[in-house]
């Protein structure tokens, strides 16, 4: 029956259905349906509602931890933009970054890297410094240190306005983490100090949580354990204040390591239990892998060596599919 309808009639019906749903009080619960109907109606060239609801559907899927579904919504919306406007649409670059982050959370680092590099190239071509910064920060979700990542961060910092901003604070933070293995350590600590100070001036909790994560990485020596643990504790509190589960988990992960470094096994076990609960809720592949690494470490520390070897192999296999560098 559907195939027998003329195209013009299909477009009219899809748009009428979309408008009827959008007029309802519970339209936020039906953004995926709205995206579908307005996308089907966009065959006449009117794509604005389709793009708007496609982005909202992807965002809603991300909030619901349905990461593969978010990827599908963002990809379909990008295809619509490309078909009707090429790369010139101002929504193209932010949508690429959103797709890259969805790939990260869906456990596809290869697709994520390619998407972030596309976003960076487009931002560079169109001279969009803020979008270049977001693409660089997105790449930082999967890259720790590599020959492309640090130069991209440096480029983004150089092109971004020098005033205090959320993006600048995050770039400084990410660059300090990317220099984790660098010697001497003075630059990464200076970058982290600048990022934390800027985040405190901005008074924006999510940015402060981000900057505190770089402070933990900058305090990387054996003499820094107490300061690192204090930073991780503050980071958990700030992240919970702004309901950022991912940064709260990073803080808990460092709490485990530093509590063990201080011989506080009770605190470490409490942090492991909290981390395990949050990892199961988030479904984020990096944290699922990290929990597997923690479970392996527990088995080694307790002398369950045969079990530890099996757990290590499972952890490595999981990590190869999702986080690659850290897993190796």
Image (cartoon, rainbow, N blue to C red):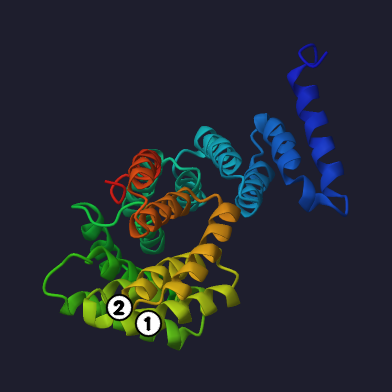
Q: Nearer the viewer, residue 108 or 296?
A: 296
Marks 2/1: CA–CA distance: 6 Å
Residue 204 seen in the figure: yes
Would you place residue 75 above or below residue 298 in this image? above
Say how many tags the image has. Answer: 2
User: Judging from the image, what secondary structure is the residue with disc 2 in?
Assistant: helix
Location of residue 60 in the rendering, given as x and y in whole percent from the top left corner: 66, 51
Residue 138 seen in the figure: no
Callout 2 environment at 10 Å: few (<14), some (14 to 19), or many (20+)?
many
Location of residue 37 in the rendering, given as x and y in whole percent from the top left corner: 74, 35
Which residue occupies 79% across, 32% down?
A: 14
Would you place residue 17 above or below residue 150 in this image? above
Q: Which residue is mark 1?
A: 196
User: Which quadrant of the figure has residue 260?
Assistant: bottom left
From the image, which quarter does the N terminus lie in?
top right
Which residue occupies 44% across, 86% down?
A: 200
User: Which quadrant of the figure has residue 244?
Assistant: bottom right
Location of residue 43 in the rendering, given as x and y in whole percent from the top left corner: 66, 29
Q: Is residue 304 left or right of residue 44?
A: left
Location of residue 22 in the rendering, given as x and y in whole percent from the top left corner: 82, 48
Q: Nearer the viewer, residue 52 or 144?
A: 144
Which residue occupies 76% across, 23% down?
A: 8
User: Judging from the image, what secondary structure is the residue with disc 1 in?
Assistant: helix
Residue 319's disc number: none
Q: Nearer the viewer, residue 247 or 57?
A: 247
Q: Say whether marks 2 and 1 touch (CB < 8 Å).
A: yes
User: Which quadrant of the figure has residue 46?
Assistant: top right
Q: Is residue 321 left or right of residue 193?
A: right
Name, please, the residue furthest toward the left.
184
Residue 192's disc number: 2
């Amino acid at each position: 029956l559907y195939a027998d309808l003329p195209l013009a009639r299909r477009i009219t019906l899809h748009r009428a259905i979309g408008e009827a749903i959008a007029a309802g009080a519970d339209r936020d619960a039906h953004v995926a349906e709205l995206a579908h109907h307005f996308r089907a109606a966009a065959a006449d060239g009117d794509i604005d509602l389709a793009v708007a609801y496609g982005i909202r559907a992807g965002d809603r899927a991300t909030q619901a931890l349905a990461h593969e579904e978010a990827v599908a919504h963002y990809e379909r919306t990008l295809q619509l933009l490309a078909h009707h406007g090429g790369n010139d649409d101002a929504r193209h670059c932010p949508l690429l970054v959103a797709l890259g982050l969805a790939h990260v959370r869906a456990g596809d680092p290869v697709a994520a890297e390619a998407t972030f590099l596309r976003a960076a190239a487009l931002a560079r071509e169109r001279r969009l410094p803020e979008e270049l910064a977001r693409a660089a920060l997105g790449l930082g979700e999967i890259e720790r240190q590599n020959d492309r990542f640090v130069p991209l961060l440096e480029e983004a910092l150089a092109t971004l306005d020098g005033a205090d901003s959320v993006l600048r604070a995050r770039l400084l933070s990410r660059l300090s983490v990317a220099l984790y293995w660098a010697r001497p350590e003075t630059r990464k600590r200076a970058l982290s100090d600048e990022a934390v100070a800027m985040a405190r001036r901005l008074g924006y909790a999510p940015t402060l949580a981000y900057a505190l994560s770089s402070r933990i990485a900058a305090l990387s020596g054996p003499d820094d354990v107490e300061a690192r643990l204090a930073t991780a504790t503050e980071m958990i509190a700030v992240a919970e204040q702004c309901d950022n589960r991912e940064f709260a988990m990073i803080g808990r992960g460092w709490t485990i390591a530093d509590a063990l470094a201080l011989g506080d096994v009770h605190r470490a076990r409490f942090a492991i239990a909290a981390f395990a609960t949050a990892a199961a809720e988030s479904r984020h592949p990096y944290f699922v892998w990290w929990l597997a690494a923690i479970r392996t470490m527990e088995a080694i520390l307790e002398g369950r060596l045969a079990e530890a070897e099996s757990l290590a192999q499972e952890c490595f296999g999981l990590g190869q599919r999702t986080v690659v560098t850290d897993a190796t």
